[in-house]
Every structure is written in C-alpha cells, then in structure tokens.
Image: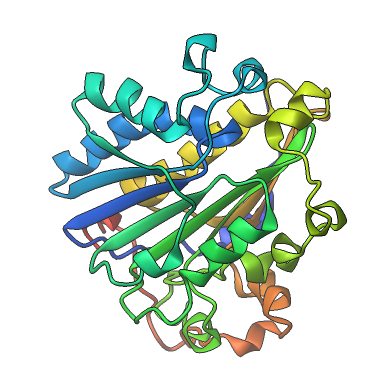
Amino acid sequence: MGLTLDMSYRQARPFVLFKPHRIQITVAGVGGTGSHLVPFLPELARQLQRDGHQVSIALVDPDTVSEQNCSRQNFFLKDVGLNKATILAFRYGVPSGMPMTAVIDRFDANKVRGWQHLTVLVGCTDNSAARRELSRALVGISEHRLILYLDAGNSFDNGQVIIGTTADRERLRRAFATGVCTDLPAPAIQEPGLLDFEPDEVMARRRSCAELAAANLQSRTINMRMAAELAQYLQEVLIDGGLRRCATTIDLKTGTARSKYLTPQTLAPMLDTTPDFFIVPQPSEAPLSLDGLDLNSL
C-alpha cells in the first residue's frame, strides 16, 4: 500500500537531546490519558537503564477514582475511592520491578527547577490552570536543556501532543545552528490557547474528563490513542533518537494524524518571525553529520 509522505519531513532536522546520567520522568495527571500511558513507562525505564541511565518515575495526581472513571480510564470498580497515582504506582511499579513514586498533590513547578538532571514532564491534565503551572517549569532554566515538557490534550474524538524545551527566544534562535535541532518552542508558544481560561473554568463549573465521558462527550478510545502517541514521542526522544516533529494532531473520525516538523519555516510563525530569524549553517559550513552518530550518546 502506497503512502503519501509530507516532504517537509525530509527537510526536518532531527532533535538531539542531551541526556545526563540521571533522568526523572514525571507524569502530571494520571486520569484519562495519563492512566493509559503509565503501563508503557516501566519498559521505557528499563531501556534507559540498559543504556546506563539512572531513572526515576513519579505520578502526580490529587484525585481519587470514581465510578465514572472506570469506563474510559485505566481503573476498575475495586479502585473507586482510592488515589489514582497510588493505585497505578502500585499496579505497574511493583510487579515490573520499576518503583514509581505517587505524589498525592497538584503539580508544583517550584519542585522541578532545583533538580540537577534531565526532567521529562508529561502533562496529561484537563485544565488550563494545570498547564500554566507545567509551563512555569520551563521558565528560567539553564543552557543545559534539563527539562523536556510534553503536553497532551483532547476533546471528543481528536487531540494533540506537543513537545517543547524552552520559551527563551535566544535559545530558540540557535536551535538549528549546528545542523540538527537542539531546542523546541514551549507548548504554550506553539499553542498559546493552551493557557487560556475557558468560560466554564472561570465560573468553576468546568466538567472533568470523567464527567465529559459520562455525558458521552468523549470517545471511548481517544485517551488510549493519545497515550500511544505520547509513548511514541518518548520512545523516539529518549531511546531511538532522531525525532523530527514538535506537535501531532490526531482525529479519530477521519483516521488522520498531522505533524509539525522541525524546520525554520515551521517554527518561525510560532515565534511571530521569519525563517531567517534562526542561525543556520552557511553553505560553506559543513553541517553536523548524523552518519554513524549515536544520538542516544549525546
């Protein structure tokens, strides 16, 4: 079967991530999408350990399981009344031999900035207030690119995954300077609407993912599909290397997925600028060759 490939993919630069010895993976929100992502994490951590990394996993969520959660989230009726993060940490951490820490609280960006290792933040929240707090983690970080933030959000039968490292324009200006891509615009730069209050949030009447699902306002499979896309992003960034996109939009109804690829032409509108904003290797300069380069060693 023939497939049509977006030619901008062939022009995209691979994202090269600096990975120190210690890696912290934090999932903020383990309800709809987050609960389906958690089963993927133990094997991801084992692969990183085989590559010589020390890995820790934290699940952050203050909520308890309700009966409504059990229809689309990764929980059972016997879990009702228990904390979501605690249940999943026990269910998948203990049998896999990959301990997970359950944080029964809302995500706090102030607890991230002091960590001197790579922190992979995965936001699976359903409100703008939580996204604003996750976005704060990218403010004022150092040149060492120690925080990677993936955001996943969805409506009834469509959603998007966005990945970013910084909101600093100067860092982004140099993102393509070596011939690969070393920085990605923060999710809130790529999609500013992520941080906007919705009218029903302001009125404190916003329904949760579980309530939307109960009202038949969310597909039964959208959260699993979003979790699979997040897992693919994590696999490509942390294990395989060579990720060439910064955002993917999924539509279950049409069966399509569209991505934004890592080129100056794609990133420039996100920064309200033009492609010549970016420093790129001149024709006389030999760009960094990926032939024989182990991206996981960088």
Specify the quadrant that holds the C terminus.
Answer: bottom left
**Residue 15 visible here:** no
Query: Which residue is depicted at the point 54% across and 77% down?
Result: 167
Q: Is residue 207 above or below residue 116?
A: above
Query: Which residue is depicted at the point 62% across and 89% down?
Result: 277
- x and y percentages locating residue 88 in the rendered image: 39, 27
- x and y percentages locating residue 226 in the rendered image: 61, 35
- State the residue in front, 109 or 26: 109
- State the residue in front, 153 or 236: 153
Q: Is residue 22 above or below residue 183?
A: above
Specify the quadrant that holds the N terminus.
Answer: top right
> In this image, 147 relative to 72: left or right?
left
Residue 222, image quadrant: top right
- State the residue in front, 268 or 133: 133
Query: Which residue is depicted at the point 48% across and 10% down?
Result: 78
> In this image, 292 relative to 77: left or right?
left
